[in-house]
Image (cartoon, rainbow, N blue to C red):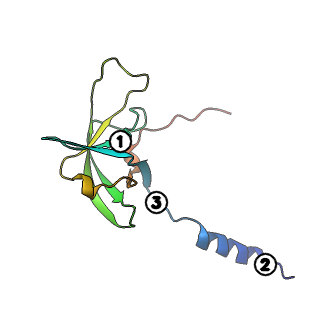
Amino acid sequence: MRIPSASRSRKFLESTAPKYDAGVRRLLTVEDTFAMSGRGLMIAPMPARHELRGPGDITVELRLPDGTRREARLSVLHEDLYPTPAIRRWACLFRDLGKTEVPIGTEIWCDEAAFMPTLRTAR
């Protein structure tokens, strides 16, 4: 029985590891969409306010379930609800896309700069 060398094993692991784009992070995976007349396409789930910078527009990459990718503009909106929920969330809206263009299962990726910094705790 032949034992593979360490460098050979490392190359195998590197070739099979998932590839991630540097400087971008997955914001969410679309679970539902709501077409709102006069506003656009609202997506769910909505990210927590402590996770994402807002309000404003950000450029995102849509990674559709069929493997295709496209760039889009996501509006991050301040929506007040009553009663105020325990976790406050941003409303996310595509003003120029429809339900067929953002199918359920689409991953939304954006630049790291769109996320709020995380606090590191001392160990």
Give the residue displayed 44% in from the left and 51% down from the top: 26
Q: Residues within 10 Å of mark 3 (few under 14, many from 20)?
A: few
22 shown above or below 39: below
Give the residue displayed 38% in from the left and 27% down from the top: 88
Q: Observer-nearest residue: 53 or 35? A: 35
Instruction: Find residue 9 and name its label.
Output: none
Q: CA distance from mark 2 to mark 1?
A: 46 Å
State the SS at label 3.
Answer: loop
Q: Is residue 70 left or right of residue 85?
A: left
Q: What amino acid does circle 3 point to?
A: Ala
Tell me the quadrant of the picture where the N terminus can be found. bottom right
Front of the two marks 2 and 1: 1
Per the image, the residue denoted by label 2 is 4
Q: Observer-nearest residue: 119 or 73? A: 73
Q: Residues within 10 Å of mark 2 (few under 14, many from 20)?
A: few
Give residue 29's position: percent from left, percent from top: 41, 49
Q: CA distance from mark 2 to mark 3?
A: 30 Å
Tell me the quadrant of the picture where the C terminus can be found. top right
Q: What amino acid does circle 1 point to?
A: Ala
Q: Is residue 122 left or right of residue 77?
A: right
Q: CA distance from mark 1 to mark 3?
A: 25 Å
Give residue 3's position: percent from left, percent from top: 83, 78
Q: Observer-nearest residue: 22 or 2? A: 2
State the SS at label 2.
Answer: loop
Per the image, the residue denoted by label 3 is 22
State the SS at label 1.
Answer: strand
Per the image, the residue denoted by label 1 is 44
- Quarter occupied by residue 41: top left
